[in-house]
């Protein structure tokens, strides 16, 4: 019973209560461990996908936080469906999500990102009110990708590169995947 209780407490400590995905703290720990493993084993890279639901604040303002929470839950489910069991999917914060894809070079990371982006743009979220039979709402996502060790030499740089690639995706019109390029400025 103690072991079972301990495991339940551990699971609560590392998962996001709304989406059921791993939380920010677990993501940071796992990314550190994966980078160390990548250095040790010298396998085919590690892609980090940082993503943000487009115009989510406006969505919440227009449809309410309960509908926003529903979208966050469904995005979490969709990310789990379109990633491998070896990938780590986490809620980074707010409407931001992250995928750690071990053994994934940049080209494959970009393909994964595009698969996720396309699945999001094709998925329609149903919104129903008492006076409305139903409205379908398109929800899109912008994704920035960086790969270790090609784009960064440590965890902090890798996150910054993926974040800057994400901002480039947003600045280019959203609903797109952008891979880190050394021409992009690091904040």
Image: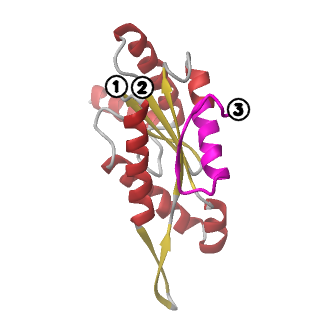
Provide the residue designation for mark 1.
103
The x and y percentages for residue 102 are 37, 27
Q: Quadrant of residue 103?
A: top left
Provide the residue designation for mark 2.
46
Q: Secondary structure at mark 1?
A: loop
- Please name the residue shown 64% across and 73% down the image: 62
Q: Which badge, 2 or 3, comes first in the chain's sequence?
A: 2
- Please name the residue shown 36% across and 29% down the image: 104
Residue 88 appears in view = no
Give the class, few, some or many, for how many residues have Cα within 10 Å of label 3's Cα (few <14, many ≥20).
few
Magenta extent = 161-187
Q: Residue furthest top?
A: 40
Q: What is the quadrant of the C terminus in the image?
A: top right
Q: Secondary structure at mark 2?
A: strand
Q: Are marks 1 and 3 in contact (CB under 8 Å)?
A: no
Residue 186 higher or lower than 52, as above or below: above
- Please name the residue shown 30% across and 27% down the image: 2
Give the class, few, some or many, for how many residues have Cα within 10 Å of label 2's Cα (few <14, many ≥20).
many
The x and y percentages for residue 76 are 42, 51
Along the line of sight, the residue nearer the viewer: 19 or 95: 95
Q: Which badge, 1 or 2, comes first in the chain's sequence?
A: 2
Residue 66 appears in view = yes
């Amino acid at each position: 019973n103690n072991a079972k209780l301990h495991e339940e407490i551990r699971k609560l400590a590392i998962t996001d209560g709304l989406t059921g995905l791993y939380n920010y703290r677990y993501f940071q720990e796992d990314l550190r461990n994966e980078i160390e493993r990548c250095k040790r084993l010298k396998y085919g890279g590690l892609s980090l996908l940082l993503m943000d639901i487009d115009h989510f604040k406006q969505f919440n303002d227009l449809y309410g936080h309960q509908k926003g929470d529903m979208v966050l839950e469904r995005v979490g489910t969709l990310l789990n469906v379109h990633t491998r069991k070896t990938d780590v999917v986490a809620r980074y914060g707010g409407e931001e999500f992250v995928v750690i894809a071990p053994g994934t070079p940049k080209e494959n990371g970009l393909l994964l990102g595009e698969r996720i982006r396309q699945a999001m743009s094709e998925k329609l979220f149903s919104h129903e009110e008492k006076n409305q039979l139903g409205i379908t709402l398109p929800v899109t996502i912008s994704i920035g990708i960086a790969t270790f060790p090609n784009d960064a030499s440590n965890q902090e740089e890798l996150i910054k590169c993926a974040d800057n690639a994400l901002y480039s995706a947003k600045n280019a019109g959203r609903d797109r995947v952008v891979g880190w390029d050394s021409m992009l400025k690091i904040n």
